[in-house]
Image (cartoon, grey):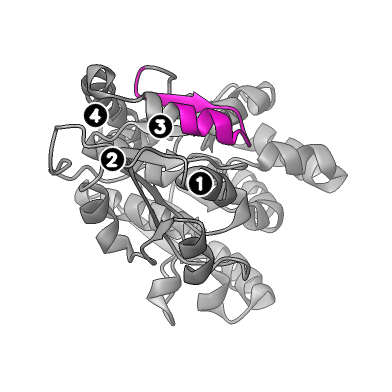
Amino acid sequence: MDKILIIGPRQNKKNPNKTGGITILFELLLEELCKRNVSHIVIDTLIENNGGRFRTLLGVYNQVVNHFLKVSHLSLHATQNSFLFVAPFVVLFGKLSGKKVSVRIFAGDMKRSYERSFFFRLVSWFVLRNSDAVFFETQYLVNYFKHYNPHTYWFPNVRKREKREKNSNNFQRRFVYIGTINEEKGIDLLCDIAKKLPEDVTLDLYGPIIEEKYSSVYFHARGVNYKGALSPDEVLDVMSTYDVLVLPSYREGYPGVIIEAFMLGLPVIATKLDGIMEMVEDGKNGLLIDVGSATQLHEAMVSMDESCYNDLQQNAVNSFDAYDSHTRTAFFLEKIGYGCIR
């Protein structure tokens, strides 16, 4: 009876445009399982699809009880909220029923929650120690929590490989930021340097504005080319017209936009954050700058030229392999006991 009970957030049924990155990752995993003909049952943990937090929890608990006899493995793919309130139940129920259990935790800020909350530490102790396999999105979280369970592995943010590349291999000094427009993403740094860049440098910003202080008028006054928001289907097409992705964030996990840049062969200029430093190697597939340094951001953009760009571009292409959904799903299945499936 090799069937998986897989628990995680599905696409938003009422408003698909509000589907977040975590849901996209979970849906991508389900797509990979279908391609491999892996038998599975899905339980949806998205609150918007279940009529509220309390009804979601009751629904998940009820479905686990109803389906556990049909499966050999329970696999929870958890946000921090579902890690706290669903994972203990799934792990306990799995152990009591003799089923194997795996837990995958999305996002990269679990360490901070763990250090701030006794309740979070208590849940972590129970869930991580009693799972048959644990997966974290970042390598630093794997290293931080592995003392609880030697069967702790890296399952990063991933993307499905698409056969496309940037429009031109020539370096035209075209830089782009793609993401939400808020202060945490380093938008003010981009505004600080925009008018200081040489005339032959292009810097364009794309993304939904989520903080009131930003607007088209705000950007125009600072010489910033704000191009509006993109739908998920537009991101790769737009990004392929640029040369370098710029991401001067103050806080990140494993940004999916960096993975998409690597797929297209775009080097990345980004900040020295734990997750980003696992993805971007300074001088190899991009350039790293200190968090909050407009001076270093300006110097990195100005210093990039044709002589170094070709190597950075090729290394960026090669870097995508680690985030290929097909490869990482095969690794996941192997570690939970489905190693023969490719």
Q: Secondary structure at mark 2?
A: loop
Q: Is residue 34 left or right of residue 13?
A: left
Q: Amino acid at mark 2?
A: Asp
Pick the front one: 198 or 206: 198
Q: Are circles 1 and 2 on residues that touch, CB within 8 Å?
A: no
Q: Earlier in the sequence, mark 2 or mark 4?
A: 2
Q: Residue at x 68, y 21 (%)?
A: 147
Q: Amino acid at mark 4?
A: Val
Q: Are circles 3 and 2 on residues that touch, CB within 8 Å?
A: no
Residue linked to disc 3: 301
Residue linked to disc 2: 200
Q: Secondary structure at mark 3?
A: helix
> Residue 145, can we see it?
yes
Q: Give the mark toward the camera: 2 or 4.
A: 2
Q: Secondary structure at mark 4?
A: helix
Residue linked to disc 4: 317
Q: Residue at x 67, y 57 (%)?
A: 81
Q: Amino acid at mark 1?
A: Leu
Reply above or below: 278 against 111. Answer: above
Q: CA distance from mark 3 to mark 2?
A: 12 Å
Q: Is residue 98 left or right of residue 113?
A: left
Q: Amino acid at mark 3?
A: Met
Name the disc covering residue 190, or none. 1
Magenta region, residue range: 284-299
Q: Is residue 289 left or right of residue 302?
A: right
Q: Earlier in the sequence, mark 1 or mark 3?
A: 1
Reply above or below: 17 against 249. Answer: below
Q: CA distance from mark 1 to mark 3?
A: 11 Å
Q: Residue at x 26, y 62 (%)?
A: 233
